[in-house]
Image (tube, rainbow, N blue to C red):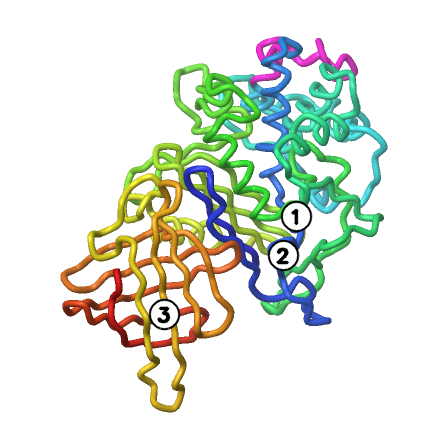
Amino acid sequence: MSMAAGIDGHLLWSEGFGYADLENKVAVTPVSRFRIGSVSKTLTAAAVGVLLERDQLDLDAEVQQYVPTFPRKEWPVTLRQAAGHLAGIRNYKGSEFYSNVSYDSVVDPLKVFSDDPLISEPGSKYQYTTYGWSVVGAAVEAAAGRPFLTFMREEVLDPLGLVDTVADRSANLMPNRVRFYDRGPDGQLVNAPTVNLSNKWAGGGYLSTPRDLVTFGLDFLDSRLLLPKTYAELTRSQKTNDGVATGYGIGWQTREDAHGRTTTGHSGSSVGGSTAFIVWPDTGLVLAATTNLTDDPGLFELAFTLGEILSPARMVSPRTSAPDSLQSYKIRFMDDDKQGGRNGTLTVRSEKGELRGRIEGAGPGRDGLIVWAQQEGDEVHALLATSSKVVNLKLVFSGDRVVAESYRAGDKLRFDGNRQR
């Protein structure tokens, strides 16, 4: 598993857990590449946005304007409907989810389903389908006048610095690609079947890292790649013909968390991979989590739980102040574990409008951003997020005397010292 979090333009934390390769005990790192499944749709939606801003794509045009090889159906089908799961295009059937056929272009896989009748009148019913996004990918390629993967790399991934996000070419040697696992009938881990994702680059064919996905989500909030009005168009929920909101725009899902806060993003499930990508637009928090396991049911719940821990309603925003007791100062500690005898220093300082902290003396120094702090009486609980770790801090104040506890990965360190402003 790998997870990452960011807020207000900052990547706060990125960390790997467990194994990228279980048999050979190769650990997951922040640059381990996972199959992100349908989160690929959200990346492709950015390419749609680029073309919209250049007036090279019309979402309300019939798909045949861009993909003339796609047969006309009983009813007209628009690109917007195909992107919003409202076109009546079917999803996988039989063993198609496990396809191991290699395709040379994004147009060739359309023949798997293009001759089939629509399963409902376009606009009448929301029916999730990755094949609809195969049509979108072909339309992007035609409108761009460049191969789909080339356009994605040159106009979306490279401009955002998403260096670890690539199309999953199963036959190629790909650095940092994890091994893929499934569960057998008895629940034991087994190697996932070999598949080829060239049948669905646009809708489910990418590898990425949570760190890259958080970077992508932060761009969504900061509008570096696309204009705010374009992102609004992509995330706005579509409606059925009778006016019922679907909760799905153009490659972006919208839902509420347990506290009624609006989130947008996407879930992803692939053979040997599961992904949760969540953005809280009102608070600026972005989370991403990936596993190398097919259909990991608890991943989205885990991501929302982490979102609760890092909720900006409880966090210290980089542009706001901490509790009074956690303003710029230095605390020098002596470990009160008589067997340990380690000296430690916690420094909290204001730097360029951000509240930063550093722990030294109990292993390598860790520098990062104080991303959450809450005061309850004489106690302050805080999270110090570095580029690779999150350190939990508990500080108990009694005048100038401070007792601090630090927790990370089950390790507990307790320090006793005096505050020095």
- Mark 3 sits on what residue? 406
- Mark 2 sits on what residue? 292
Residue at the outermost bottom position: 339
- Of residues 376 and 28, the one drawn nearer to the viewer in this rendering: 376
Tally the numbered discs.
3
Please say if 50 is above or below 372. Answer: above
Q: Which quadrant would the C terminus be assigned to in this image?
A: bottom left
Label 1 secondary element: strand
Residue at the outermost front position: 421
- Disc 3 residue crowd, few under 14, some 14–19, many 20+, Cα 10 Å: many
Please name the residue shown 47% across and 33% down the image. 253
Q: Is residue 60 magenta?
A: yes
- First in sequence: mark 3 or mark 2? 2
Going by the numbered disc 1, the residue's amino acid type is Arg
Query: Which mark is on residue 35?
Result: 1
Please say if 375 is above or below 417. Answer: above
Q: Is residue 179 magenta?
A: no
- Of residues 365 and 54, the one drawn nearer to the viewer in this rendering: 365
Task: Tell me the mark number nearer the camera, choosing from 3 and 2.
Answer: 3
Going by the numbered disc 2, the residue's amino acid type is Asn
Q: Which residues are magenta?
A: 58-80
Label 2 secondary element: loop
Q: Where is residue 305 drawn, in percent x and y? A: 38, 53
